[in-house]
């Protein structure tokens, strides 16, 4: 019996409670949708920022690799040139040594013959003075070649670690 008197109040309370819950759910749903949209925008911006940073880092590394490759190629060309120069200088040095050895050897047919007691000694040929001057020039050329070889080898030893 008491239910017969209270049911309109209970029905009203249930109706108002349901209406309140539905409106709260609707309002929260709109707020939640707006929050999801904001979070999606944030994720998009964060992804774009990360991609831009990654692309910038990749481009910087590619530039460094390209510069290192160009430097390596330039060093290789320089090293090849220096090696060729060293080889040419060594060949010139060897040729000068052979010429110097040939110039200091006595000429064929100029053997020292025993002198007769009654003959005066033969005067020294003027060739001896030119031999001395030639030997000095050859010695200077050999010294210069050695200096150039030393400089070239120093450059090669300086460039080799860069390769």
Image: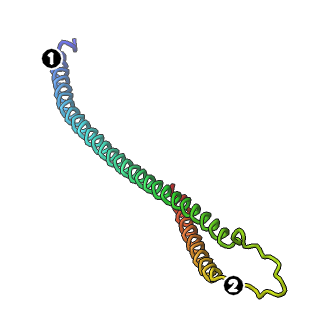
Q: Compared to 144, does 82 lie above or below?
A: above
Q: Earlier in the sequence, mark 2 or mark 1?
A: 1
| Residue occupying the far right of the picture | 117
Q: Position of residue 128 (x, y in %)?
A: 65, 81
Q: Position of residue 37 (x, y in %)?
A: 21, 35
Pointer 1: what residue?
8
Residue 59 got which mark? none
Question: Helix or strand or loop: what does disc 2 sit on?
Answer: loop
Pointer 2: what residue?
124
Report the side of 17 relative to 140 (left or right). left
Circle 2 or circle 1, nearest the eye = 2
Report the side of 16 relative to 84 (left or right). left
- Give the Cα separation between the discs numbered 2 and 1: 154 Å
Report the side of 36 relative to 119 (left or right). left
Write down the quadrant of residue 111 in the picture: bottom right
Instruction: Say which residue appears at 67% left-offset and 69% top-offset.
Output: 101
Q: How is the image coloured?
A: rainbow
Query: Closer to the camera, 47 or 74?
Result: 74
Instruction: Assess disc 2: are there few (<14), some (14-19) or many (≥20) residues with their C-alpha within 10 Å of its C-alpha.
Output: few
Question: Helix or strand or loop: what does disc 1 sit on?
Answer: helix
């Amino acid at each position: 019996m008491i239910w017969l008197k209270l049911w309109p109040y209970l029905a009203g309370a249930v109706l108002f409670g349901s209406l309140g819950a539905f409106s709260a759910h609707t309002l929260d749903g709109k707020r939640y949708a707006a929050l999801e949209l904001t979070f999606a925008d944030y994720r998009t911006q964060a992804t774009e920022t990360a991609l831009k940073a990654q692309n910038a880092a990749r481009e910087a590394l590619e530039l460094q690799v390209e510069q290192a490759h160009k430097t390596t190629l330039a060093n290789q060309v320089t090293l090849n040139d220096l090696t060729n120069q060293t080889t040419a200088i060594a060949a010139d040095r060897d040729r000068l040594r052979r010429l110097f050895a040939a110039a200091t050897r006595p000429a064929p047919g100029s053997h020292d013959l025993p002198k007769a007691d009654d003959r005066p000694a033969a005067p020294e040929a003027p060739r001896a003075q030119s031999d001395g001057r030639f030997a000095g020039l050859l010695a200077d050329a050999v010294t210069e070649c050695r200096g150039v070889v030393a400089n070239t080898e120093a450059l090669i030893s300086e460039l080799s670690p860069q390769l």
